[in-house]
Amino acid sequence: MTSCIFNFVSNISHLAIPVRLNNPFAREISEIAMTAAKDFQSYLISASTKWDYDFHAQKGKMFGVLVVEKPDTSLAYLAAVSGKLPNKIHDPNLVPSVFDDSTDDYFINREMTSLTKMCKLIDNTLIEKEVASLKEERRLKSMAIQERLFENYTFSNLSGETKNISEIFFHFNKKSPPSAAGECAAPKLLQYAIENNLKPISIAEFWWGNPHKYQDKQHGLFYPACRDKCRPVLEFMLDDDTLYDAVD
């Protein structure tokens, strides 16, 4: 657990401590969360050199920080990236995915390898009728893999209830989760805190590096949690189904 906990470098003794976690969908950011983000950004500048990755020249990413109170009542923060780091970079100091790749003897690796082989087979098949059949088989297989994956994305809430992401979305809108649901920074951070007896204090997310392809995310700026992927999960985790409505 300790490898994912960052101690503050900046002096926080003069900062007010929020009495409750801020709304992840609102734009207000507490000073202590802002300080955690600035500390972590300094870490990113150093770490990206070791990763041999230039966020300003290549693809930028969304990151998040969560200020937490440890069991001894001292304050620290967690950090996570939305999705995965580029170029298969792994940093053990960042909160990992909620999904464990080793589940069922690494079933996800086996299934993705099988899909890759199927794609190559389609590319090398000349008979149109066979191609159509293989594409349908691939579609059904992809759906089955996605559903199995979602069944293994399990989140807890502040009341001690546990649900996988398929159950969360079905309860929310009777639909299946969108692709990559559960991989955003905020759900990762909160899940890690809940699992490890760390009290969530304040959360913030920011874009780091090259602007998003739609130019709606700019380097160093803070943004609220996303609606489509995060709303059902965060409202379940925080036991509050009015979070997003409160900032509409």
Image: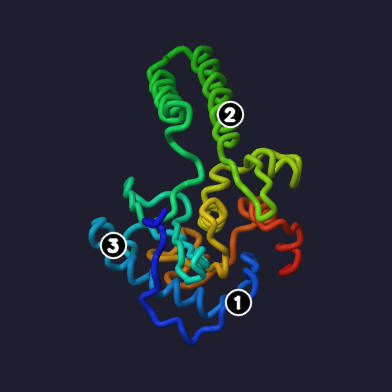
As shown in the figure, which amino acid type bears the numbered disc 1? Pro
Name the front one of labels 1 and 3.
1
Q: In the rendered image, which quarter is residue 230 located in?
A: bottom right
Whole-angstrom CA distance, mark 1 to mark 3, is 30 Å
As shown in the figure, which amino acid type bears the numbered disc 3? Ala
Q: Residue furthest bottom?
A: 14
Q: In the rendered image, which quarter is residue 93 located in?
A: bottom left
Q: Secondary structure at mark 2?
A: helix
Disc with the residue nearer the chain's start (1 vs 2): 1
Q: Residues within 10 Å of mark 1 (few under 14, many from 20)?
A: few
The tag on residue 238 is: none
As shown in the figure, which amino acid type bears the numbered disc 2? Met
Q: Are marks 1 and 3 in contact (CB under 8 Å)?
A: no
Q: Which residue is mark 3?
A: 47
Q: Position of residue 3 (x, y in %)?
A: 36, 56
Quarter that holds the C terminus: bottom right
Name the front one of labels 3 and 2.
3
Q: Residues within 10 Å of mark 3 (few under 14, many from 20)?
A: few
The tag on residue 18 is: 1
Disc with the residue nearer the chain's start (1 vs 3): 1
Disc with the residue nearer the chain's start (3 vs 2): 3
The tag on residue 143 is: 2
| In front of the other: 145 or 153 | 153
Q: Secondary structure at mark 3?
A: helix
Task: Identify the residue shown where x is 69% and y is 53%.
Answer: 159
Task: Identify the residue shown where x is 57% and y is 30%.
Answer: 148
Whole-angstrom CA distance, mark 3 to mark 2, is 36 Å
